[in-house]
Amino acid sequence: MRKPTFKDITAQAGVGTVTVDRVLNNRGGVSPDAVGLLRIEVLLVQPQSTFT
């Protein structure tokens, strides 16, 4: 599985790359509704872990 790009995130959220950048880097200037759309959860797994 490849890492998502800004383009992937903007397409999914329906916003521009500047909005994604502002949200991910806490730059402000983004409406609360747009921020809610861009919340991303990440699960980090150690390479030796397996899911069954």
Image (cartoon, rainbow, N blue to C red):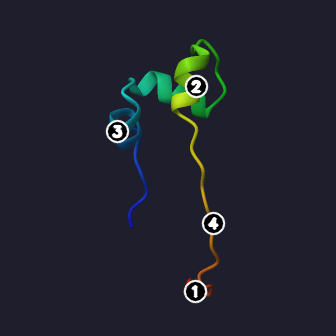
Which mark sits nearer the N-terminus, 4 or 3?
A: 3
How much space separates mark 1 and mark 2, taking CA atoms? 33 Å
Identify residue type, mark 1.
Answer: Thr
- Is label 3 in a helix, a strand or a loop? helix
Taking 11 as reference, is 43 above or below it? below
**Residue in the image at 60% along x and 50% along y:** 41
Write down the residue under mark 4. 44
**Residue in the image at 61% along x and 17% along y:** 32
Which of the two discs, 1 and 4, sits closer to the camera? 1
How much space separates mark 2 and mark 4, taking CA atoms? 23 Å
Please report contact status of discs 2 and 3: CB closer than 8 Å, yes or no.
no
Which of the two discs, 3 and 1, sits closer to the camera? 1
Please report contact status of discs 1 and 2: CB closer than 8 Å, yes or no.
no
Which mark sits nearer the N-terminus, 1 or 4?
A: 4
**Residue in the image at 45% along x and 22% along y:** 18
- Is label 2 in a helix, a strand or a loop? helix
Write down the residue under mark 3. 7
Identify residue type, mark 3.
Answer: Lys
Write down the residue under mark 1. 50
Which mark sits nearer the N-terminus, 3 or 1?
A: 3
Write down the residue under mark 2. 35
Please report contact status of discs 1 and 4: CB closer than 8 Å, yes or no.
no
Please report contact status of discs 2 and 4: CB closer than 8 Å, yes or no.
no
